[in-house]
Image (spheres, helix red, strand yellow):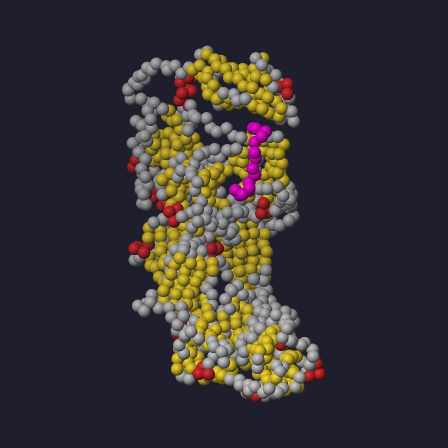
């Protein structure tokens, strides 16, 4: 085709231009060293950002980011294993990824021998399997079914175990063959499914029994277990082997002709036929021309050895010479074995069978392809996925990644990665995350009849929770006693009108946790904080009765002499908070009587008496000495007035005298009477003295503790004086006690002790009230309502493992003190249960080895270790076997005396102390016990062990015997050569190690374990296999129509294992692109059909065995031309289309202003056919050949780079494009500024 037409057919939109002129590459570095990644951008002013695992990196002591013009670098110092990751550099819209690989320093830690083991084909790997790197699911399996092998006609059992201790319902198990075939419907003669449950261990055991296995039972199986929102899956394989032929059977005899002599040349009429199971008995002598040939019948001749050493041209002659006529039937008999999965040509590493991800998280699916430049397609349930914000496609070298962000239940599907016609598939299971309890329940103490609300907060809205009381699930009942409320993430349990039956422990459960709180319901007991007191008032004064109770919601009624008091103009009844008042203004004589306050709903009352004082003074014209009338108040000189701190102290003293006496108040002892004088003209703000006719009143507002003492009043006038002492006692609530001390703790209790307060408030201490709270809570819960008289208290009904605090109140007749400081936090903890399964593992003349298991109940505290003790029989003295504690569950006690009978015991220790001891059933005599040698050959070594050439073989065989037995290895009856394999022996096992297997390592390895004259033997057969050689004597037998018949002979070297098939490929000699015609083809002849006439073909054949394809194929020497059948094709004539186009700038130059000394670029885009010639001008001067300027043309984008411009380089730049169809010009102005 002419150039314009080619251009039209091959035109593609231009790919985005990378912002990087040089990209950083993947590097490998040692631990402790530094590494530098360098990148170079196209533009010097480009902004560059570095990332590690998609997170931005900032300069610090670990990372150093530098930039110099368009050169950028990232330096990582003091490299560790954690620095091995995927890094990226971003500039504009370009992002380049690279990796840092970290290796250990020489002589340092042991390097990893290999990273990923082939999951679905464990054949060929050593017993010490590398760790499974596949993503673990939810871990429901405690024992997974393992891949197995079975011979045709034998039985095999696969076992799966599930621990149901953490499951809310019975798990459901399904068995599958392949991907979708459910085996539950296939139970019968050859398949049985069983299920058992152990109530002690709470473990379900599921078994799949395969009875009288057949060859078609082989393949991949899957076991799935589910329970509500939990799921787990496990894949395993079943390999079915054909029954082996009896020893001594001559396999060639089945394929020999029936007559010892015959005529052995094929006639042209003898066509190729497939051999069947009876083909060894066919007689071909009647189809052959007569020619006498002597047949050799030596049975000790190895025909395969002769064929491997003979040239291909002699194969047919050798087969005839040794009487093997039906070669195809022979191959069919010899090559029956399991079919190996074809090795992928497009994928180096495929997707894992299954992945699991939590809802809301992201997951990355990765495959490794053979061609780093190939494009892949990602499919979801067969539909192609388009890249979006949630689906991100990445390509790093040969790795291809699909990242799914914010996974939802809609992402639970089958995903495939497709390369050409080949694809690999996986299953993605999206698991809803466990619902966590963010805010725990709070303990509550309420009064009977009150409303209870238990509130918690979970991690996700709309989650389902389960409420329990004392282990019994709560549901909505007809009485609507319990109500359940949801508000976003908050869940509330509401109990209306709580009763004593509602006391208990309430628990809220989710699939990710639980929280428990205690609810206490108390009967309402009204406490009287201040009772009403008797009053004595005179006419027209005010009388106030006041009392204070504990409940501010309690109302009450006032009575006078049994008759309810009604409020009026003089009588006022008030209720403010806990204080109830009865106020009587302008007191009259008829107001005198007994007043009572009765709280509503309580069977008690408060009473006081109102005394009316009427003072009568007769006028005497003469002078009377002053007189203090305390007797009229009902008091004597020794009487004591008690006032509660904070209340008003009012001393109203009647006095007489003419003329009116002067009143002086003093406080203190009589010898200090004149100290602190309060006259009617002075006061300190709280103290007031008032003198009226016939009365002197002394008042102290808000009485305090220091106001207590003896108050003296002195009245004087010219006729004399009188003195009286009044004892005032100020009582108050006691001081708070000191912080309590925790004496001991138990599983759900503690013993707390405290000291009495330093000051009892002037009244005896009645008792104490205690409160506790959880450490992280703000709610204090009262433990007792009646005052507790002692200073030591045992608090119960606490939750083990939860930290608490305690505080104490002191109570006297006046009221309750402030609370004490909180105690030190403490945790109720109980000792663990005794260790389990204490037994003797080994005994020698001077030592004993004990074993045990962890206690069944550990508790909330961590297990600190175990203590081992022993005592001699007949004594009670227990002797520690070691200093301190051990964390192991086994112990070797040495230094014992031979012949002693000792008893042993083990105790577990935690923060609460030692547990109950675990003791042996009977004393043990310290004396070594003889034991016969016995080899415990692993099951996988009882069959032939197959390894590939170059694999590592590591065989571990345990044995027993005392004293230590002698271990001997031999190979094929000869002592094992140390240069052939390495052997390491211990007291309990022996290891046979070959670092790199070769064909010569194949053979039978025998192990002998001997103690004196007693011995035990075991044998392991090793077969080292390799890739086969190419087939021999490939030739074209016949050609007809669109078909070609091919024929070849088996390869000389079968790789030490049988040939399983052949791969036949064809190629057109024009393109020499090879296409597979037959794969895993078992015969040594085939017909290739559907060839295209007019093409010339060549053919090649690969051999296949257990390892794979032969490295080289055998190609046909001649080619085959498929003749045309007389049809002549006349191609139509077309007029060439004119694609020429004059140059046109699609993107003009843009005026720029740059800084001197930094590289500058001018860019524009042009199109035109044929490709135009481009010339650059500065101020109309051609600059194309000047060294200071560099021109770049890429996909029609033209760039002029000016290296380190100076002010002289400023001016008008012009770009001119010319071709045969015309020309076009663009120009711009460049300004160069100084630094």
Q: Which residue is painted at 65% across and 83% down in the image?
A: 717
* Quadrant including the C terminus: top right
Q: Is residue 435 left or right of residue 29?
A: left
Residue 1179, position as x, y percentages in the image: 58, 14
Q: Which residue is painted at 46% across and 83% down in the image?
A: 589
Asked whether residue 1017 is drawn in magenta, I would say no
Quarter of the image holding residue 710? bottom right
Residue 282, position as x, y percentages in the image: 31, 42
Q: Is residue 1023 left or right of residue 80?
A: left
Give the answer, above or below, for where 1045 lies relative to 485: above
Please tell me which residue lies in front, 1081 or 1045.
1081
Please tell me which residue lies in front, 494 or 255.
494
Residue 161 appearing in the image: no
Residue 476, position as x, y percentages in the image: 33, 65
Quarter of the image holding residue 506? bottom left
The residues colored magenta run 42-56
Q: Which residue is painted at 65% across and 76% down in the image?
A: 678
């Amino acid at each position: 085709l002419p150039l314009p037409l080619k251009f039209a057919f091959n035109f593609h939109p231009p790919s985005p231009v990378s912002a990087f002129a040089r990209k950083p590459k993947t590097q490998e570095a040692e631990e402790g060293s530094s590494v530098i990644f360098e990148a170079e951008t196209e533009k010097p002013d480009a902004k560059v950002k570095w990332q590690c695992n998609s997170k931005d990196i900032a300069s610090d002591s670990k990372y150093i980011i530098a930039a110099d013009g368009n050169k950028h670098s990232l330096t990582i110092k003091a490299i560790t294993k954690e620095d091995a990751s995927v890094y990226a550099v971003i500039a504009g819209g370009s992002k380049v990824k690279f990796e840092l690989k970290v290796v250990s320093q020489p002589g340092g830690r042991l390097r990893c021998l290999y990273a990923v083991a082939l999951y679905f084909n464990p054949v060929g790997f050593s017993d010490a399997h590398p760790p499974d790197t596949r993503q673990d699911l939810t871990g429901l399996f405690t024992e997974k079914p393992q891949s197995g092998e079975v011979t045709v006609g034998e039985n095999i059992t696969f076992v799966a175990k599930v621990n149901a201790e953490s499951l809310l319902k019975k798990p459901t198990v399904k068995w599958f063959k392949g991907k979708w075939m459910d085996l539950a419907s296939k139970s019968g003669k050859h398949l049985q499914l069983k299920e058992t449950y152990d109530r002690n261990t709470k473990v379900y055991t599921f078994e799949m029994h395969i009875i009288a296995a057949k060859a078609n039972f082989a393949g991949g199986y899957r076991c799935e277990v589910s329970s509500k929102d939990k799921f787990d899956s496990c894949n395993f394989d079943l390999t079915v082997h054909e029954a082996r032929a009896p020893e001594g059977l001559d396999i060639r005899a089945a394929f020999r002709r029936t007559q010892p002599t015959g005529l052995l040349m094929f006639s042209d009429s003898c066509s190729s036929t497939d051999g069947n199971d009876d083909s060894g008995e066919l007689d071909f002598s009647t189809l052959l021309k007569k020619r006498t040939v002597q047949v050799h019948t030596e049975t000790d001749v190895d025909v395969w050895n002769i064929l491997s050493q003979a040239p291909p041209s002699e194969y047919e002659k050798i087969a005839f010479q040794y009487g093997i006529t039906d070669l195809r039937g022979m191959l069919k008999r010899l090559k029956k074995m399991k079919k190996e999965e074809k090795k992928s040509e497009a994928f180096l590493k495929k997707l894992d069978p299954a992945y699991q991800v939590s809802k809301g998280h992201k997951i990355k699916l990765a495959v490794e392809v053979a061609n780093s430049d190939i494009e892949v397609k990602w499919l979801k349930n067969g539909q192609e996925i388009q890249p979006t914000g949630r689906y991100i496609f990445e390509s790093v070298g040969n790795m291809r990644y699909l990242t799914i962000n914010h996974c939802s239940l809609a992402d639970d599907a089958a995903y495939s990665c497709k390369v050409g016609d080949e694809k690999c598939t996986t299953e993605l299971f999206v698991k809803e995350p466990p619902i966590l309890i963010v805010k725990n329940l709070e303990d509550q103490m309420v009064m009977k009849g009150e409303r209870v609300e238990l509130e918690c907060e979970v991690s996700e809205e709309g989650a389902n929770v389960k409420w329990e009381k004392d282990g019994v699930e709560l549901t909505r009942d007809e009485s609507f006693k319990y109500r359940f409320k949801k508000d976003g993430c908050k869940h509330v349990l509401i109990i209306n009108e709580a009763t004593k039956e509602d006391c208990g422990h309430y628990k809220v459960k989710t699939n990710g946790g639980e929280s428990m709180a205690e609810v206490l319901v108390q009967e309402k007991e009204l406490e009287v904080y201040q009772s009403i007191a008797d009053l004595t008032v005179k006419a027209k004064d005010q009388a106030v009765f006041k009392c204070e109770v504990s409940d501010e919601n309690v109302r009450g009624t006032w009575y006078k002499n049994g008759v309810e008091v009604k409020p009026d103009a003089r009588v006022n009844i008030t209720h403010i908070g806990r204080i109830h008042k009865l106020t009587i203004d302008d007191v009259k004589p008829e107001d005198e009587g007994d007043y009572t306050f009765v709280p509503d709903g309580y069977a008690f009352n408060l009473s006081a008496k109102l005394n009316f004082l009427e003072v009568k003074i007769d006028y005497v014209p003469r002078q009377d000495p002053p007189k203090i009338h305390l007797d009229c108040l009902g008091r004597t000189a020794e009487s004591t007035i008690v006032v509660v701190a904070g209340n008003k102290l009012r001393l109203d003293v009647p006095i007489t005298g003419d003329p009116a006496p002067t009143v002086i108040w003093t406080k203190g002892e009589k010898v200090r009477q004149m100290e602190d004088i309060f006259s009617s003209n002075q006061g300190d703000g709280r103290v007031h003295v008032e003198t009226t006719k016939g009365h002197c009143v002394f008042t102290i507002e808000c009485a305090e503790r220091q106001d207590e003492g003896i108050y003296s009043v002195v009245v004087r006038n010219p006729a004399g004086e009188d003195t009286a002492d009044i004892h005032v006692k100020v009582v108050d609530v006691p001081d708070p006690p000191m912080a309590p001390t925790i004496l001991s703790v138990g599983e759900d209790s503690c013993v707390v002790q405290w000291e009495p307060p330093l000051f009892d408030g002037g009244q005896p201490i009645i008792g104490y009230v205690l409160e506790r709270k959880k450490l992280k809570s703000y709610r204090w819960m009262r433990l007792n309502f009646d005052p507790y008289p002692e200073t030591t208290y045992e608090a119960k009904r606490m939750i083990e493992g939860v930290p608490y605090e305690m505080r104490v109140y002191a109570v006297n007749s006046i009221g309750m003190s402030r609370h004490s400081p909180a105690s030190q936090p403490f945790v109720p903890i109980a000792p663990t249960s005794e260790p389990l399964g204490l037994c003797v593992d080994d005994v020698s003349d001077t030592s004993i080895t004990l074993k045990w298991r962890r206690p069944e109940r550990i508790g909330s505290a961590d297990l600190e270790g175990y203590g081992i003790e022993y005592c001699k029989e007949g004594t009670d003295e227990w002797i520690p076997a070691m200093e301190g504690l051990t964390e192991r569950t086994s112990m070797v006690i040495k230094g014992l005396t031979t012949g002693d009978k000792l008893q042993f015991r083990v105790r577990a220790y935690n923060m609460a102390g030692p547990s109950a001891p675990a003791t042996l059933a009977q004393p043990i005599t310290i004396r070594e016990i003889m034991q016969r040698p016995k080899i415990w050959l692993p099951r996988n070594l009882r069959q032939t062990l197959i390894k590939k050439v170059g694999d590592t073989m590591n065989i571990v065989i345990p044995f027993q015997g005392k004293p230590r037995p002698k271990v001997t290895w031999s190979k094929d009856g000869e002592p094992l050569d140390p240069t052939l394999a390495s052997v390491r022996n211990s007291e309990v096992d022996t290891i046979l190690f070959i670092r790199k297997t070769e064909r010569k390592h194949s053979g039978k390895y025998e192990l002998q374990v001997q103690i004196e004259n007693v011995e035990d033997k075991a044998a392991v057969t090793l077969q080292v296999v390799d890739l086969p050689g190419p087939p021999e004597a490939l030739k074209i037998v016949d050609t007809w129509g669109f078909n070609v018949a091919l024929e070849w002979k088996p390869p000389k070297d079968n790789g030490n294992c049988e040939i399983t098939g052949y791969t036949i490929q064809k190629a057109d000699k024009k393109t020499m692109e090879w296409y597979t015609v037959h794969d895993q083809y078992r015969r040594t002849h085939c017909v290739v059909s559907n060839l295209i006439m007019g093409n010339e073909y060549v053919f090649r054949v690969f051999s296949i065995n257990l390892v794979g394809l032969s490295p080289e194929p055998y190609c046909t020497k001649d080619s085959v031309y498929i003749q045309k059948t007389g049809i002549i094709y006349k191609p139509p004539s077309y007029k060439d289309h004119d694609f020429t186009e004059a140059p046109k700038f699609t993107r003009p130059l843009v005026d720029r202003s740059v800084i001197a000394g930094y590289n500058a670029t001018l860019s524009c885009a042009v199109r035109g056919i044929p490709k135009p010639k481009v010339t650059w001008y500065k101020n109309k001067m051609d600059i194309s050949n000047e060294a200071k300027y560099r021109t770049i043309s890429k996909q029609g984008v033209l760039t002029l780079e000016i290296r380190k411009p100076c002010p002289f380089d400023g001016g008008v730049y012009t770009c001119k494009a010319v071709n045969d169809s015309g020309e076009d010009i663009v120009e711009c102005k460049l300004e160069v500024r100084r630094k």
